[in-house]
Amino acid sequence: MATSELRRADRRGVTPQHLLYMAMKIMRFRVRDSLTVAFQHVGKNASITRQQIKSEECINNFIENNLAFLREIPNSTRYWSEWKRYIFSMIRQLGKPTVFLTMSANEIG
């Protein structure tokens, strides 16, 4: 629902605060979904409690260990490593990137 609201053509009722709130809400949903998947694959011997997730020290430890749920958070190391892997795969498939620059005089204005 939030993504459809952000992509609608009628933008009259959207304030910047509401737009940022909805973007943050979408990011929270994505992180929550990836958190459940990431913690299902922790292993049988490891147990993660609610207190560990709420503690700042544990979250910093997760960030240092580069856990999988961080790929949904923009500007995290995992997020950029995913993009780097994607770009390098495109370069392998398509070849070296080429830049074209077209310049022309503005004769109208």
Image (spheres, grey):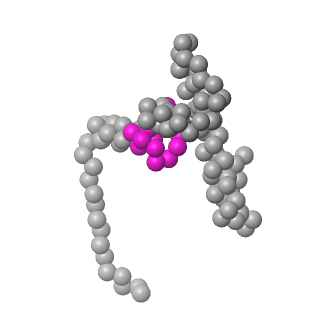
Query: Quadrant of the rendered structure where residue 86 is?
Result: top left
29 over 102 or under it: above or below: above
Tell me where residue 13 appears, x and y as whole percent.
75, 65
Residues 20 and 44: in front is 44
Tell me where residue 94 appears, x and y as whole percent.
30, 41
Tell me where residue 104 appears, x and y as whole percent.
31, 76
Residue at 60%, 32% in the rendered image: 53
**In the rendered structure, does residue 35 fall within the stretch colored magenta?**
no
Range drawn in magenta: 68-81
- Chief secondary structure of the magenta span? helix
Total number of numbered discs in the rendering: 0
Query: Quadrant of the rendered structure where residue 38 is?
Result: top right
Identity of the residue furthest to the right in this view: 13
64 over 4 or under it: above or below: above
Residue at 49%, 38% in the rendered image: 60
103 over 37 or under it: above or below: below
Q: Is residue 4 visible?
A: no
Q: Is residue 21 visible?
A: yes
Residue at 54%, 33% in the rendered image: 58
Identity of the residue furthest to the top in this view: 44
Tell me where residue 49 appears, x and y as whole percent.
63, 25
Residue at 24%, 46% in the rendered image: 96
Q: Quadrant of the image for the C terminus?
A: bottom left
